[in-house]
Amino acid sequence: MRHRGAFALMFAVALLLFSSNVLRAQNPPVTDDEVKVKTYNRFVENRDPNPAEAYEAAREYMRLYGKEDDQYTRYFKIWIPAYEEDVRTRRLAAEREDREQQLLVAFTQKKFADAYARAGQVLNDDPNNVKVLIPLGYGGVVASTDTRNENFNADAANYAQKAIQSIESGHAPDTWAPFKSKDDALGSLHYAIGFYWLKSKPEEAIGHLIKAAQSNSDRKTAPTTYYYLALAYQNGPYKKLSDDYSRRFGNQAESPESKAALENVNKVLDKIIDAYARAIALAGSDPQHQSAKTQWTARLTEFYKFRHANSDAGLTEFIAGVLAKPLPQP
């Protein structure tokens, strides 16, 4: 219907430019030439129900009578190019849709290399195609967690950023599935970027994971959101500050400067403790998280005891109440 509308628009322009000739061309030519009348009538009878047949009739008419200059030939000189442009437009649209569907099917079949290989051409058709940008942006998470393949993470991070920009500028797919809503998709894309940048850009990953945690999406209550947030703090500011502290103040007597530096380390450590506690609290008794929960608990206990004179007193209560507290900001 959309392409027929485009064709109708082109023809409407032609009508405005050549209205008198076009209107007169609705009636068959008055002539003793039966072929001429029959060919024109074949065009008129098929113009709406069967444009392809009408096109063949129009071309035949112009082949036989194109040297004449009357309302009929002038009419066909407008109609034939308009029809050909419409056919070309519909063909290109079908090719674009086919490329898009092949990419989406590749994701469904978890053929990630195939999907990402098709991305450039599909997005060349429409750089703001969020229907494609969303799976391209989140697909790296699935590839990494399901098949242990991190080869697509860098590209996926770029696509996730483009998807967020496109969505926030007003673009939307015809459906948000497999996500529940726009907010769920955005939260998941921020989560994905945080995941991709855990090793390469942990400081920047923190901001995206916090956005995921504060979004109206499933990522808000996903234990892994907070586990990755803890890792981002560990890989980024904690490592940087603790390494700097060791380099500058290791094996030295405490000084006001070293005390201030240690306090900065501890502030980040408290955020790591908070993030691990949230991951554990949200994991609850869910069977799919129990193995990870055991590991998270061991890591949390280590950090907690480091901050509390080698004691885990109060840790259980801290975990139980952590979700009622505001999420610490970077």
Image (cartoon, helix red, strand yellow):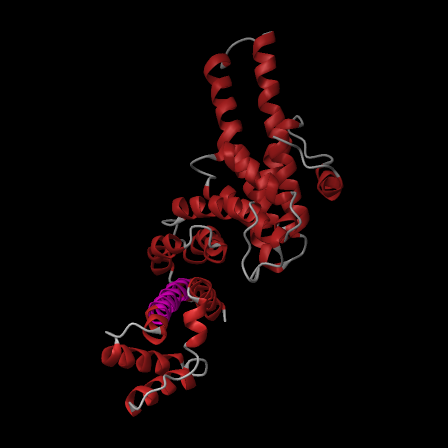
| Left or right of residue 94, residue 309 in this image | right
Picture quadrant of residue 206:
top right
Q: Is residue 167 above or below residue 55?
A: above
Up-down: is 157 above or below 10? above
Which residue appears at 68% of the width and 47% of the height? 281
- The answer to whether residue 85 is magenta is yes
Which residue occupies the foreground of this view, 33 or 239?
33
Name the residue located 63 percent from the left edge and 35 percent from the top edge: 273
Labels in figure, total: 0
Q: Residue at x 36, y 52 (%)?
A: 124
Q: Residue at x 47, y 66 (%)?
A: 12
* 47 within the magenta span: no
* Magenta highlight range: 78-103
**Most foreground residue, 17 or 304:** 17
Q: In the displayed orientation, state which residue is furthest to the front.
A: 31
Residue 192 seen by the camera: yes
Q: Above or below — where is 108 with respect to 271?
A: below
Q: Position of residue 150 (x, y in %)?
A: 39, 49
User: What x and y, as percent, mark residue 36?
Assistant: 30, 86
Most common SS among magenta residues = helix
The reply to whether residue 254 is in sight is no
Asked if residue 290 lies left or right of residue 144, the reply is right
Which image quadrant: the C terminus?
top right
* 69 versus 162 height, above or below: below
**Horizontally, is 233 left or right of 285 in the view?**
left
The image position of residue 320, as x and y in percent, is: 74, 44
Q: Looking at the picture, tell me which residue is in the foreground, 268 or 57.
A: 57
204 horizontally vs 126: left or right = right
Please name whichever residue, 89 or 218, is drawn nearer the observer in this view of the structure: 89
